Amino acid sequence: MRLGEGVEQAIHSVAMLSGLSEGGVLSAAAIAEFHGVSTSYLLKHLQALSGAGILDTVPGPKGGYRLARKPAEITLLDIVLAVEGPAPAFRCGEIRQRGPNPLPSRYFAKPCGINAVMLKAEQAYRAELAKTTIADLGRALAEVDDGGIAARGCAFLEIHERKTAR
């Protein structure tokens, strides 16, 4: 299974926004600059995250994005579903019922075995993503960071974070 690159951008963006101070926001342009990605492409995903209640949008020239919930309340599954949508990754088109010499419907009374296995795999994948929060990612990063990653993020936020009322 391949997820769109928007999922990676969305997860990193949410993780970055978890480092904002109280009342702070970041513009989409700043988030895109930090990650070296297209602002217009990232905006689409930030809007999806806002629509899913993961991010708050603050309008105006000093506006931007911030988390709508605590990092411990945002799972990777929340982000993936916001960006990719809730539909299963595998969609059975029942091709077993197509082609020449079709069989009677009695051969298809049970669900397609391939579809059943794929849906079971998707359930396991989603359950794993639901176990991991943005806070978990932050803790894991802190365990391996010698200070360089945190320093880079803090220096960027020092320049680009906008202060607003909460």
Image (tube, rainbow, N blue to C red):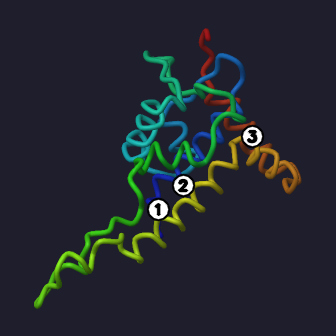
Tally the numbered discs: 3
Element under label 3? helix
Mark 1 and 2 residues: CB-CB less than 8 Å, in contact? yes
* Mark with earlier residue (2, 3): 2
Neighbours of disc 3 within 10 Å: few (<14), some (14-19), many (20+): some
Q: Quadrant of the C terminus?
A: top right
* Mark with earlier residue (3, 1): 1
Q: Residue at x 54, y 68 (%)?
A: 121
Of residues 161 and 142, the one drawn nearer to the viewer in this rendering: 142
Q: Quadrant of residue 95?
A: bottom left
Q: Position of residue 97 (x, y in %)?
A: 20, 78
Q: Residue at x 57, y 42 (%)?
A: 13
Q: Position of residue 45 (x, y in %)?
A: 43, 42
| Residue holding disc 1 | 3
Task: Give the vertical position of 125 relative to 159 (above or below).
Answer: below
- On residue 8, which mark appears? 2
Mark 3 and 1 residues: CB-CB less than 8 Å, in contact? no
Marks 2 and 3, Cα distance to the nearest angstrom?
Answer: 16 Å
Marks 3 and 1, Cα distance to the nearest angstrom?
Answer: 22 Å
Element under label 2? helix
Q: Position of residue 147 (x, y in %)?
A: 86, 48
Tell which tag, 2 or 3, sits nearer the viewer: 3
Which amino acid does the dot numbered 3 rest on?
Answer: Ala
Q: Position of residue 3 (x, y in %)?
A: 47, 62
Q: Residue 11 vs residue 38: left or right?
A: right
Which amino acid does the dot numbered 2 rest on?
Answer: Glu
| Residue holding disc 3 | 135
Q: Residue 156 vs residue 8: left or right?
A: right
